[in-house]
Image (spheres, rainbow, N blue to C red):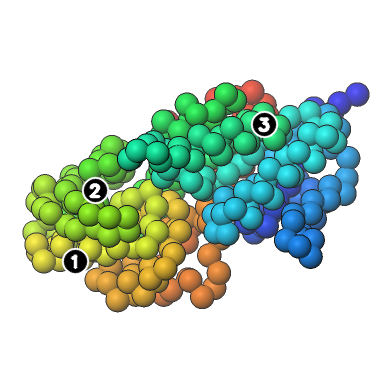
């Protein structure tokens, strides 16, 4: 007879988010699943599941962050292993969904890699995907299985409400580009502050050029809001432009700290006071600059897993 309730939930992890996975399991009040994910000498991924999963609702915690292809293959192979071990259901919990920026054909003969990854997850045997702050929300439509799209914004707004609650009337939320306006508007509504928008032109990938600022930032404290920071060119250029236009203090936040290439140097040398990020991507100690504060998403993911398991509404988490 299959168990019901939390006893039938099993949480496994690959190598991308081990600490976060342990926090999620702890929030659920269960032990981590016993598994090993390693590599053979030729670089192929080796997965061993060391306990029975027959009939269980299994959740695999794994961001497809750097090294993205290794982490993706670990996830796909673990899904396959669990499927062949007769797991009752398999949910891929992907705090950061890699390849999300390749969501359309920007020019002739471009791939749509985000759709390809969705196909691979489905083919491997995933029954559900749980993720957070997709770069493009329409990616949910690439899947033929349910997708629970969680929001990191409540964690960020709660942090700023506690830190600046007495002074929020002097703040403005700023979108670093036109594509983030909807996200920033929701952020600003939660804090009851106005917004401003930076209109920029990007001549080529990872190179941004500030054009102009829509909204009043002179004499204001600002919070730059984005879903991810990769090479940090956009956010640092935006901070400089805001400073030139009279902003008094500049803070920044994002859900996904990709932080590749020159990102750390740019952030360290920028006029940004503090960069607040979430732990959807594990940051090694050398990337945790004094300017960077990392908050945990474990509680939200644990609540979502519990609600899914119990057949409750996940959207209620964000009402």
Is mark 2 in CB contact (under 8 Å) with mark 1?
Answer: no
Q: Left or right: where does residue 284 sit relative to residue 267?
A: right
Image coordinates for residue 196, horizontal then vertical, percent: 17, 48
Residue 120 picture quarter: top right
**Label 2 secondary element:** loop
Q: Quadrant of the C terminus?
A: top left
Sequence-wise first label, 2 or 1: 2
Image coordinates for residue 218, horizontal then vertical, percent: 8, 59
Sequence-wise first label, 2 or 3: 3
- Whether residue 222 is visible here, answered yes or no, is no
Q: Residue at x 57, y 24 (%)?
A: 144
**Label 1 secondary element:** helix
Q: Residue at x 34, y 70 (%)?
A: 267
Q: Left or right: where does residue 65 sit relative to residue 223?
A: right
Q: CA distance from mark 1 to mark 3?
A: 46 Å
Image coordinates for residue 248, horizontal then vertical, percent: 15, 66
Residue to which mark 1 is pinned: 240
Please, is residue 60 above or below residue 318 in the view?
below
| Residue ranking furthest to the front | 109
Residue to which mark 3 is pinned: 123
Q: Residue at x 47, y 61 (%)?
A: 294
Q: Residue at x 54, y 59 (%)?
A: 66
Q: Left or right: where does residue 249 sit relative to residue 98?
A: left
Sequence-wise first label, 1 or 3: 3
Residue to which mark 2 is pinned: 177
Q: CA distance from mark 2 to mark 1?
A: 14 Å
Q: Quadrant of the N terminus?
A: top right
């Amino acid at each position: 007879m299959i168990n019901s309730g939390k006893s039938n939930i099993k949480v496994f992890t690959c190598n991308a988010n081990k600490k976060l996975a342990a926090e999620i399991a702890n929030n659920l009040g269960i032990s981590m699943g016993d598994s090993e994910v390693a590599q053979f000498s030729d670089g192929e991924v080796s997965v061993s599941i060391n306990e029975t999963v027959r009939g269980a609702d299994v959740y695999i915690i794994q961001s497809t962050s750097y090294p993205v292809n290794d982490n993706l293959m670990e996830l796909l192979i673990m899904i396959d292993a669990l499927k062949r071990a007769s797991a009752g259901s398999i949910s891929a919990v992907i705090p950061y969904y890699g390849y999300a920026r390749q969501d359309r054909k920007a020019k002739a003969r471009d791939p749509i890699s985000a759709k390809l990854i969705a196909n691979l997850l489905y083919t491997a045997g995933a029954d559900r995907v749980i993720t957070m702050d997709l770069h493009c929300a329409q990616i949910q439509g690439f899947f033929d299985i349910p997708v629970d799209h969680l929001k990191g914004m409540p964690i960020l707004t709660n942090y700023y409400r506690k830190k600046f609650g007495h002074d929020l009337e002097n703040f403005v939320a700023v979108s670093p580009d036109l594509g983030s306006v909807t996200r920033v508007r929701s952020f600003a509504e939660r804090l009851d502050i106005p917004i401003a928008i930076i209109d920029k032109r990007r001549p080529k990938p990872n190179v941004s050029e500030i054009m102009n600022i829509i909204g009043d930032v002179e004499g204001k404290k600002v919070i730059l809001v984005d879903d991810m920071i990769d090479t940090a060119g956009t956010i640092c250029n935006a901070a400089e432009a805001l400073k030139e236009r009279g902003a008094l203090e500049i803070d920044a936040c994002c859900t996904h700290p990709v932080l590749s290439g020159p990102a750390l140097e740019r952030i360290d040398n920028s006029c940004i006071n503090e960069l607040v990020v979430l732990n959807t991507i594990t940051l090694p100690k050398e990337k945790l600059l004094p300017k960077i504060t990392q908050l945990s998403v474990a509680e939200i993911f644990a609540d979502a897993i519990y609600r899914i398991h119990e057949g409750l509404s996940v959207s209620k988490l964000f009402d």
